[in-house]
Each structure stands twice: as structure tokens, then as C-alpha cells.
Amino acid sequence: MTIKGESGMYRGDAAEYAGNVALGNHQASDETVETNPAAEAAQASKLRVQDLSLWYGDTQALFDVNLDIPEREVTALIGPSGCGKSSFLRCINRMNDLVPNVTIRGDISLDAESIYDPSVDVVQLRSHVGMVFQKPNPFPKSVYENIAYAPRLHGLVSSRAELDDLVEKSLKRAGLWREVSDRLDAPGTALSGGQQQRLCIARAIAVDPDVILMDEPASALDPLATATIEELIDELKAHYTIVIVTHNLQQAARVSGYTAFFHMGYVIEYNDTTTLFTTPYEQKTEDYITGRYG
Amino acid sequence: MKLKGTVNDPRMQRRYRAEKRFRLYAMSAVLLALAFLIVFFADIISQGYSAFYRTEVQATINYNDRVEMGDYRAAVSDEIRTVVSRGMLRNLPREVRDNPDLKGTSETSWMPVKGEIDQYRKGHVDSLDEELLASVQRLDEAGRLGFAPNWAFFTNGDSKLPELAGIGAAVVGSVYLLGITLIVAFPIGVMTAIYLEEFASDNWLTQTIEVNINNLAAVPSIIFGLLGLAVFINFFGVPRSSALAGGLTIGLMTLPIIIISTRAALRAVPDPVRMGAFAMGCTRWQVVRDHVLPVSLPGILTGTIIGLAQAMGETAPLILVGLIAYIQAPPTDITSAATVLPAQVFTWAGMPQTAFAEKASAGIIVLLTVLLSMNAAAVFMRRRLERRW
Ligand SMILES: Nc1ncnc2c1ncn2[C@@H]1O[C@H](COP(=O)(O)OP(=O)(O)OP(=O)(O)O)[C@@H](O)[C@H]1O
Ligand SMILES: [Mg+2]
């Protein structure tokens, strides 16, 4: 599949849009309230998750998740450990395909195209949806090769000069160029933890994806490196749709425009971040964000 | 806090004593092993080193008519004839016939002496036929006997005459055999390991295969010999005694070693690397080729070298497939009769003459040197390639 190049057509203003989504997303408690954003707003979302359920063997880990994730925004996923955030994230780039015995129902569409359609090429999908992991996992190759690998793999460059440019551009965009420009040949694993994580981000953006998924990208880093990553995320949202899982609520509040609260496999509440953190609609959300449990 | 007084506390002292005792045990174990090793090496070397030089006699060879007719004994004086190795004279008639220019000339050169004289001069035997002894003493006094490096030991094939026997043919046989073993076992072993480790899902079938591969590695090597005999020679008609028959048999034996070490090397590559690659849109094969194999290559090669070193020293299964034959000339191809180094050592060790015992020890020295270098190469390679990441 060629996931369509035309970007989503979201035109409305963010607050109004988020309001719609939020209202439509209490199904965990209100049972079957249809997601009822206007047809227009539905089109605007980059990722549209519909009635997504997931089982590991016989154990259900996600229950009827409905989310509309807006384009060029940061959407945070929060919730207590084991509530299914990572499982959900892995559905978006179909990494769950690699886990044996996984059953998935429902659908996710990227730019209104179903990613679970049998005709979808997973390789192609993953070149549109990049992922950054909790623990930095640079390839055991040089810094340069770490970035250059995927563009070459997907045939995005035609010459060495073009590739050099792309490597430089990606490293610059990830805020790493200044630190590594003179050691592009050094092994990626020789960088510091924070640098490695930014290298992984640079690696993800080198193929110019539409969406970047981040699973607790800063949880293995010290506060300073975390701040750097957060600034980076803030800059990246001008170009990419970012979905980030975090246990750090302040971080979610700082970097994200929208936040979804997961609990035991359900999305309890989904709203713009300010609203969710200041005036949560659900009791469980309030309990969680005030630290009463989780 | 009570930090200082405890040193004299009986309980602490008991702990220290136990610690000391354990270290002593461990150290003595190491020393004992080391001592065995040193005794073993010293013994082998002291018995074998003398095979690397030999006694030679300065002889004048006359290429006369009688030699051309076939009477090679006429080529040297009676005295020389009693001491020089028969094998050196046998070829003279043909040499003259092939090269008529030689006719009527004479030539003085150093030639190996009979095995028993060589052994006597090296002090390995203390008696010699009286007449022979007289000749030897006379020649010795005339300065016509001397020691010289025995290069022929490395180039000659086996011989009934110990002074002419060498490991040349066996070394070529071993090289052929290892080549075939490598060609058979390396690709199949690595591919199998990659499939089991990276592609196959974890079900009863793969688990059964895994258990059986581990069992295969523990099967006594002689069983592989029987298998090789039954399958390759009797069923497929591979020539008996050939490097091909031996290589296939040993290849089968090396296979599980390579599979197991390759799987261990693949497993050592952290999973997050694979996940990262998958998330970049790699197919499974691309993940393996571009990210897993480069990292695990040193481990795979090390395992392969160790497997080959083991194959190199293997004797029992090769005796069953006939690689123990009396081979005078190196095999010309993989289907002609061959022998291998350890089998050659085995043959010599069974000979009654002391000269062959010396050869056997020298063969072991060569074998051990090769094996140690192979293992050193494995260690070196691992260090060299692994340090990069
Ligand atoms: N590969 C797997 N096989 C079986 N069960 C799994 C697997 N991965 C996750 N689970 C289960 O699914 C549930 C959700 O896990 P998930 O990793 O998505 O939680 P999470 O919200 O990311 O937690 P955390 O914040 O601790 O990372 C958990 O109960 C977990 O045990
Ligand atoms: Mg998680």
C-alpha cells in the first residue's frame, strides 16, 4: 500500500475538535456512546482508532479503544503500569504482529486508510510510522550508518551526497549534529544514553515518517537529557504526529496537546491536555493524576 | 558503630579461614591441571623432537652401466651401501634412464641413513649389528656422518622405511577433509541455526529439533563413523578411504557443534536491536542480515573454528570409513585414497620400530601445534572483531 501522501484535512480549531473527541470517549463507563465528532473532524485526525481490542492468548489487554489522534500534535498516553499503553502503541505500527498468539479486533486508520487491511504492506507502514523505544537501542553500527540505514533500505536516496545531506539534516533536527558531527564513524553505542536516544529519534525521522511513536522515551535518562528530549519533541511536532507514552505526568503536561488516560485496557478519558489535567471528567482520571493510585 | 573490633572476632576469623581454604583448593586444582599439561607436553616433545632432524651420510653415487640395467646397489661403495637408506638408491636406475646425461658421471651428496642407525646415533637404541656398528664408527670418524634438518618429514608420505616416512600425504589429506567438512557443515549449520533462532516459531516441532541437535552433539564420534560407512559409502557409493567420505562423515559430526555455537552467538544479540530494525520496516531477513549477523559473526566463526579443530583431531570415525590406509603419495583429488594426520599418528604408534614411535610423537607435536594455532586464531578473531561495538 502507498499510504496516501495527502495529509489529513483537519481545519477546525483544536479545542473544539478535542471537545468532540473527549465527549465521545467515555464509553468505558457510558457503554455505547458513539464517537460523534462531525464528519469533518473525523477526517482531520491523522490516526483513527475504532473499537480496537487486543488479546494476548486468552487474556484481553485492550478493550474497545476509540481514539482520534490529531495531526502534527503530541498525544500523550498515560495510565498505571500494565494498563495497555505499550500494547496500544505497538498496534499503531503493527509491531504486535511479531508477538505470537496476539488477536486484534477493530481497526486503526492512518490518513483514512486502514492499516489492518490485508493488502497493507507492513514494511511500508513502518516507514510511515516510526518508533522510539524506552531503552535507547541504536544499531551496532556507526552513528552515520544508524541514520543512513533506513533511507537506503527504503530507497529514499539516490546518491552518497544526498545521503550525507539527509544524515546531517536528521541529526540536526534531532539536535545531535553539534555533538556528533566529528564522530560520525564512532559506534552509535559509544554515545551517552541521552545522545543514543536522540540518535534513535534521528534514525526514526530520517525516513520522514508521518507518525512517530515513543514509548517512555526519556524514562532511562537523567533530568537534563530528559529536558533535551522534551524540547526536541516540542520542535518535532511541527513536522510529525507524535504519540508518546509516559509515566511522568509533568512530562505529559509539558509536551502534549492531547492526553489519553488508560486504565486496565480501557481508555477512560481522552481530552486536550490542559482540560484533562485541570478538570478531569472521570473520577478515575482525577484519582490517577492526583497520585491517589496507579 | 563497631567496625574495628570484629577482626579478632572468632566468627569473622572462621570466615576468613574458610575463604583462604577455598582459594587454596581452587589454586591447587589449577596447578594440578597445569602440571599434567606440562608433563604431557614435555613428554611428547622430548620423544618427538628428534624426528625433525636425521642422520645423513656423505655418499658418492656412480651412475654406471649396472645402475642403468637396474642394479642400483652398484651405485655406491659396499660400505655406504650398508648404511644408506635403501629407499634412496631404489630410484637411481629410473633416474639414469630418464636423464641419459647422468650416465658415466658421479655425484657426491648427503643422504639419509637406515632408520636403525639414525636411532642409534640419537641414542634411542643402544645396540646395533656389530658389522654395521664398525662401519658407522669408521664413517663417523671420517666426518662423513652428520645430523641435518629432516624436511622430508613434512613432504614425504608414509613409508615402510621409517627414515623416509613423513606426514606430507596426511597433511594434504587433512586439508582436503577439513575443506569438505567446512563446505558441508558451515552453510548448513549456520542456516539451520538462523532458521531455528530467528524464523521458526516456538512449537513442539522446533523444540524436538532443538533437543535432538543437542543430543547429536553428544553422540560418540564412532557412531558417526558407522553412519558414514552405511550411508555415504554403502548407499551413495562414495569411494572408501577418500577425503570425500571422511569429510562428509566428519561434516555430519561437526554440524551440531556449529549449530549450537551459532545459535548461542545469535542469542547474544540483544532483542531491542531486532525490535529497532523491525520498527524501521526491515523484513525478518533484513534484520538478520544487516543487524544480527554482523554482530554475531565473531561468535559464529569462533564456534566454527573450534568445531573444525575438533574435526581435525578426530580419528575413530575416520578409521571406519577407511582413512587409515597406507598412503605414500598425497591424494590428488577428493575421491582418491587418503589418510589424515591423527590416523597417520595412530598407524605409526602401532609399529614395532622405535623410529616410528619417534615419528608418531613428532606427528602429535605437529597436530597439537596446528590445533593450538586454530584455537588461538579463534580467540584472536573474537577479540579483534568483537571490540568494534
Ligand atoms: N508479549 C506479551 N504477552 C503476553 N502478555 C503481554 C505481553 N505484553 C504485554 N502483556 C500484558 O498486557 C498487559 C498490558 O501490557 P502493556 O505492556 O501494554 O502495559 P503498559 O501500560 O505499557 O505498562 P508499563 O507502563 O508498565 O509499560 C499487561 O497485563 C501485560 O502483562
Ligand atoms: Mg509499557
Image (cartoon, helix red, strand yellow):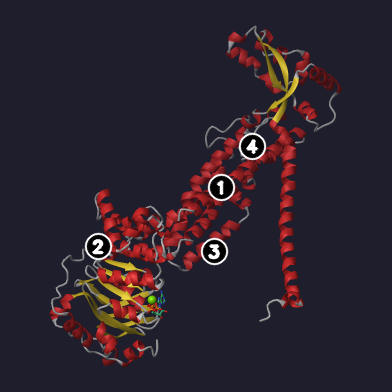
* Pointer 3 chain: B
Q: CA distance from mark 4 to mark 1?
A: 22 Å
Question: Would you identify the image quadrant in which residue B321 lies?
Answer: top right
User: Dot 3: what SS?
Assistant: helix
Q: Amino acid at mark 1?
A: Leu
Crowding at dot 1, Cα within 10 Å, few <14 / some 14-19 / many 20+, comes out as: many
Q: CA distance from mark 3 to mark 2?
A: 45 Å
Question: Could you tell me if the residues under marks 3 and 1 are in contact, i.e. CB atoms within 8 Å?
Answer: no
Question: In the rendered view of the protein, which quadrant contains the N terminus of chain B?
Answer: bottom right
Q: Nearer the viewer, mark 3 or mark 4?
A: 3
Question: Could you tell me if the residues under marks 2 and 4 are in contact, i.e. CB atoms within 8 Å?
Answer: no
Crowding at dot 2, Cα within 10 Å, few <14 / some 14-19 / many 20+, comes out as: some
* Pointer 2 chain: A
The residue indicated by pointer 3 is B211
Q: Looking at the image, tell me whether mark 3 or mark 4 is earlier in sequence order.
A: 3
The residue indicated by pointer 2 is A208
User: Dot 4: what SS?
Assistant: loop
Q: Are marks 3 and 1 on the same chain?
A: yes
Residue A256: percent from left, percent from top? 27, 77
The residue indicated by pointer 4 is B325
Question: Could you tell me if the residues under marks 3 and 4 are in contact, i.e. CB atoms within 8 Å?
Answer: no
Q: CA distance from mark 1 to mark 2?
A: 47 Å
Residue A64: percent from left, percent from top? 29, 83
User: Dot 1: what SS?
Assistant: helix
Q: Quadrant of ligand 1?
A: bottom left
**Furthest-right residue in view?**
B130
Question: Could you tell me if the residues under marks 3 and 2 are in contact, i.e. CB atoms within 8 Å?
Answer: no
Q: Are marks 4 and 1 on the same chain?
A: yes
Question: Could you tell me if the residues under marks 4 and 1 are in contact, i.e. CB atoms within 8 Å?
Answer: no
The residue indicated by pointer 1 is B308
Q: Amino acid at mark 2?
A: Asp
Q: Looking at the image, tell me whether mark 3 or mark 1 is earlier in sequence order.
A: 3
